[in-house]
Image (cartoon, rainbow, N blue to C red):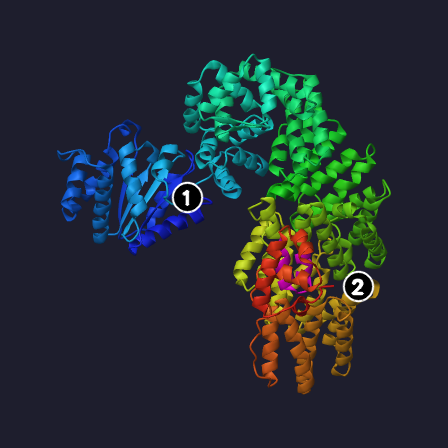
């Protein structure tokens, strides 16, 4: 049910109340909230699960509000059969009060006691729930009686629930009754409701603005969605006008406003148009319009505003209703007065907004002022505000070329703030024929980023072409701009992989190589390295890759963030996963310090991929969990990408993983699909399904797509050897050995030695296995070291050296259990059992820690203070302490030093 979004705790409160009544521990609750917050809907949902209980409902009506005991009469009617069970005096009092008997006017307390007795009798028969809706419209007498009943319910099988808008009379009558304040929906739930209600797509930043301005009011949000299109809402936000609201709430507040004197309405309009709530500004502007203090006093007495040092409307919807019900000339007149006042105070940004609102047509002067203010806002990091300022400037710019140039700049600012849908909507308004070459190139770049942010499957596949076209637009006239879209094109090619349409990877590489030569610098080094990696033989490319890694390590912090996606390319290209992890983790640290959380999110995602490539599913999962937590912090609720490769390691059925992987490929994320194929194949190797793994890996290695699968060559060799495809294994081993000779890193040398052992005779195999272990012990390649020990142990058992085999297998099992490589752990246990070693239970290594607990424990174990952990994870130090105490209990440790034993350094 839409209106129940974000109401889980309130629903639980009501259900607990009803459950207590079922067990003769009745009670009452006052549910209070503004119009439209969903009180009735919440009650209906809570009542869906009350089988076996009697439910009675009465609703207050304005027409009956002056009819004494009218609501009580309606409540008592279905309980008339229980009247004989209450004392006679109470029967009389209740009868007289209800108009069913003639007698002396009863005391209200006696009527209350009679009502309590009646409900208790009914509850003794069948547990009873009484719901009183629109309590603020009850007649005074019924309200007092029900207050009496509510304060005395305790051991009866009865629950009474009142639902009301904020009302002083209700508060007085129901004093002492437990209260549930039903405010607007939280940001996430409100955003979901608005997105579900509106026709079309809204950018998250626009959604957040309307949720905030409406106070999360569900009715207001539903009305917005039903009466305004996404385009209209976006335009309203860009114009910075108060929220347009639905007819129901608008009518409610507008009726109250229209009943006020004209001078009070005009004063309210000044207050509504003044967005900061500055009482002195409102007062001065009102004075300039000929209004005196009596106007504000009347508005305060009406309960619409409070005026002290600031002006506060009773609810944002009141402000919106005042503004939207005003005539356009009055609005422009008010904004003109506010412009003059804010300009006199040196409040340039506010003055610019008011100038735009006061304008009745196109104005180059106002447009230029808005653009200048947008620059000031951007200097403070306000890209979202810049986007809206520039969009508004574009609307009133008289020259078409200037207007469309401003729209492009607005779209750039929007995408820079993460508002991808807004950026796309702004681009849709751009006439590219009005732009110069640089403007067209900028438009193409923003469009590509929108596709990436919005996970648009069609645009993702064509994104590389668009970025190359952008580079072409910059060519010869702006070399400093040409290289950036080329680097972005490489990122897109990694993302979409073989799904890239309109261009081959070799064509991309040749254009990238051309762009590397237009200007020296960091971009040139990066572009030259990757294009060489794609086009040249490995021996030629490796020095350029090393240059790129050196460049990345020497970058200052701010510059490093520009290469957050790229850093994995040359490092993994050199078979140096440790360097990749080092740079990515530095990117995370820098991003956290600078608040560049989107870059942190991206780096965590790539870190998880690096760890999966070296078979550490546990750490990969922890990185992804951190990314998910961060996305929730940023407000992105929907997961755009599912890491199906990790699912393969987590035990999800193969067919399901393949379906998800196929979906990711169709959505334009071919890189994730490639990762998943590799993960499935490695798990098949662990399970002994060598031919199936060989078939998968043969295609993967034969079609590397930017060399992205060459690190699967060792897997291919193992699968080929074990499936009887030794010729293929030898060919692949020759390729791997060439990589090892050129790259020379411990990782590739260790893998090369392992594969040589698989192909060697018994006389030579042991030497190669020991060489492999030695190389893989030099870095953070624990899983690959364990895999070598597993193969070595299997070989040792085959040559009847069981004691030595058990030593290798035991060490391998410990690592596999620690990194969460369950398939290999199972295989190792089977091998131990075959060698006569009894099966042993897997120890609870990390006590079922949550992802956040695991990261806190890891950082604490490595020496970070609570304050440092808090800063890195964007939580409080108190929260860190709370989680650490839970971690100590779960792991049965007493010191941070002991934590380090559970969480060894990753590099």
- Give the x, y percent position of residue 474: 78, 34
Indicate the quadrant containing the C terminus: top left, top right, bottom left or bottom right.
bottom right
In terms of depth relative to the viewer, which is nearer, 226 or 19? 19
Query: Can you say whether 194 is above or below 682 in the image?
Result: above
Q: Return the disc, 2 or 1, that comes first in the chain's sequence.
A: 1
Task: Point out which mark residue 824 bears.
Answer: none
Are there few (<14), some (14-19), or many (20+) residues within 10 Å of tag 2? many
Residue matched to label 1: 180
Q: Which of the two marks, 2 or 1, is nearer to us in this view?
A: 1
Q: Is residue 269 left or right of residue 543?
A: left
Could you tell me which residue is drawn at 15 percent across and 33 percent down? 104
**Residue 739's disc number:** 2
Residue 252 percent coordinates (x, y) = 41, 26
Q: Where residue 42 sits in the image (x, y, percent)?
A: 38, 43
Q: What stretch is highlighted in magenta?
A: 607-626
Q: Check if residue 612 falls in the magenta segment.
A: yes
Does residue 536 appear in this view?
no
Are the residues flagged by discs 2 and 1 in contact, CB closer than 8 Å? no
What is the x, y in percent for residue 300?
A: 48, 24
């Amino acid at each position: 049910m839409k209106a129940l979004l974000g109401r889980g705790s309130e629903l639980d409160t009501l259900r607990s109340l009803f459950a207590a009544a079922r067990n003769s521990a009745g009670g009452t609750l006052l549910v209070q909230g503004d119009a439209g917050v969903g009180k009735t809907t919440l009650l209906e949902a809570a009542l869906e699960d009350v089988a076996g209980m009697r439910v009675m409902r009465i609703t207050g009506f304005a027409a009956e509000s002056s009819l004494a005991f009218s609501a009580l009469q309606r409540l008592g009617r279905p309980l008339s059969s229980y009247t004989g069970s209450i004392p006679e005096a109470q029967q009389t009092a209740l009868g007289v009060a209800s108009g069913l008997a003639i007698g002396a006017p009863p005391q209200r307390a006696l009527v209350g006691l009679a009502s309590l007795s009646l409900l208790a009798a009914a509850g003794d028969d069948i547990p009873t729930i009484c719901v009183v809706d629109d309590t603020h419209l009850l007649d005074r007498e019924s309200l007092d009686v029900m207050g009496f009943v509510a304060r005395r319910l305790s051991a009866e099988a009865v629950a009474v629930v009142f639902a009301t808008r904020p009302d002083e009379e209700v508060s007085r009558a129901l004093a002492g009754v437990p209260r549930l304040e039903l405010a607007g929906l939280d940001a996430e739930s409100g955003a979901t409701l608005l997105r579900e209600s509106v026709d079309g797509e809204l950018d998250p930043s626009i959604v957040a603005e309307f949720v905030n301005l409406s106070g999360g009011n569900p009715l207001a949000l539903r009305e917005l969605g039903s009466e305004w299109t996404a385009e209209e809402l976006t335009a309203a936000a860009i114009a910075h006008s108060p929220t347009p609201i639905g007819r129901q709430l608008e009518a409610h507040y507008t009726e109250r406003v229209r009943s006020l004197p004209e001078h009070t309405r005009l004063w309210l309009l000044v207050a509504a148009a003044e967005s900061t709530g500055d009482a002195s500004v409102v007062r001065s502007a009102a004075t300039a319009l000929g209004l005196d203090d009596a106007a504000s006093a009347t508005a305060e007495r009406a309960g619409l505003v409070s005026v002290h040092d600031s002006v506060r409307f009773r609810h944002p919807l009141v402000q919106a209703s005042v503004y939207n019900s005003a005539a356009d000339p009055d609005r422009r007149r008010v904004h003109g007065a506010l412009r003059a006042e804010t300009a006199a105070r040196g409040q340039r940004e506010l003055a610019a907004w008011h100038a735009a609102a006061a304008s009745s047509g196109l104005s180059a002067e106002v447009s230029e002022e808005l653009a200048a203010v947008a620059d000031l806002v951007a200097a403070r990091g306000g890209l979202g505000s810049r986007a809206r300022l520039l969009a508004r400037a574009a609307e009133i710019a008289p020259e078409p070329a200037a207007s469309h140039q401003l729209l492009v700049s607005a779209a750039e600012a929007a995408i820079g703030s993460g508002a991808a849908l807004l950026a796309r909507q702004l681009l849709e308004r751009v006439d590219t024929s009005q732009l110069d070459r640089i403007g067209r190139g900028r438009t193409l770049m923003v469009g590509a980023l929108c596709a990436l942010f919005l996970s648009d499957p069609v645009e993702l596949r064509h994104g590389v072409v668009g970025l190359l076209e952008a580079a072409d637009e910059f060519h010869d006239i702006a070399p400093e701009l040409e290289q950036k879209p080329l680097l972005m094109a490489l990122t897109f090619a990694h993302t979409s992989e073989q799904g890239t349409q309109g261009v081959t990877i070799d064509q991309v590489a040749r254009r990238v190589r051309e762009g590397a030569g237009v200007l020296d610098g960091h971009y040139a080094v990066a572009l030259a390295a990757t294009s060489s990696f794609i086009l040249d033989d490995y021996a030629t490319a490796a020095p350029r890759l090393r240059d790129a890694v050196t460049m990345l390590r020497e970058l200052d912090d701010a510059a490093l963030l520009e290469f957050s996606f790229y850093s994995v390319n040359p490092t993994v290209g050199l078979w140096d996963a440790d360097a990749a992890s080092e740079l990515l983790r530095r990117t995370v640290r820098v991003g956290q310090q600078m608040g560049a959380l989107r870059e942190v999110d991206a780096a965590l995602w790539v870190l998880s991929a690096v760890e999966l490539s070296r078979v550490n599913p546990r750490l990969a999962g922890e990185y992804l969990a951190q990314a998910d937590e961060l996305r929730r912090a940023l407000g992105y609720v929907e997961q755009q990408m599912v890491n199906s490769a990790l699912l393969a390691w987590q035990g999800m059925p193969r067919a399901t993983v393949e379906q998800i992987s196929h979906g990711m490929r169709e959505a334009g994320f071919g890189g994730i699909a490639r990762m998943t194929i590799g993960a499935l194949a490695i798990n098949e190797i662990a399970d002994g399904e060598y031919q199936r793994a060989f078939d998968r890996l043969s295609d993967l290695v034969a079609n590397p797509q930017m060399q992205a699968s060459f690190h699967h060559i060792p897997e291919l060799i193992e699968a080929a050897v074990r499936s009887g495809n030794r010729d293929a294994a030898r060919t692949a081993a020759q390729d791997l050995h060439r990589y090892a000779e050129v790259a020379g890193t411990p990782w590739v040398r260790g893998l090369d030695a392992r594969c040589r052992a698989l192909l060697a005779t018994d006389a030579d195999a042991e030497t190669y296995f020991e060489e492999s272990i030695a190389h893989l012990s030099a870095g953070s390649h624990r899983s690959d070291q364990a895999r070598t020990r597993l193969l070595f142990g299997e070989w040792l058992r085959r040559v009847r050296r069981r004691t030595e085999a058990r030593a290798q297998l035991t060490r391998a099992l410990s690592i596999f259990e620690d990194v969460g490589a369950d398939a290999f752990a199972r295989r190792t246990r089977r091998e131990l059992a075959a060698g006569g070693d009894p099966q042993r239970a897997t120890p609870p290594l990390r006590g079922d820690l949550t992802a956040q607990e695991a990261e806190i424990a890891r950082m604490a174990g490595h020496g970070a203070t609570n304050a440092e952990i808090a800063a890195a994870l964007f939580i409080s130090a108190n929260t860190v302490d709370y989680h650490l105490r839970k971690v100590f209990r779960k792991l049965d440790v007493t010191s941070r030093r002991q934590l380090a034993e559970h969480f060894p350094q990753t590099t």
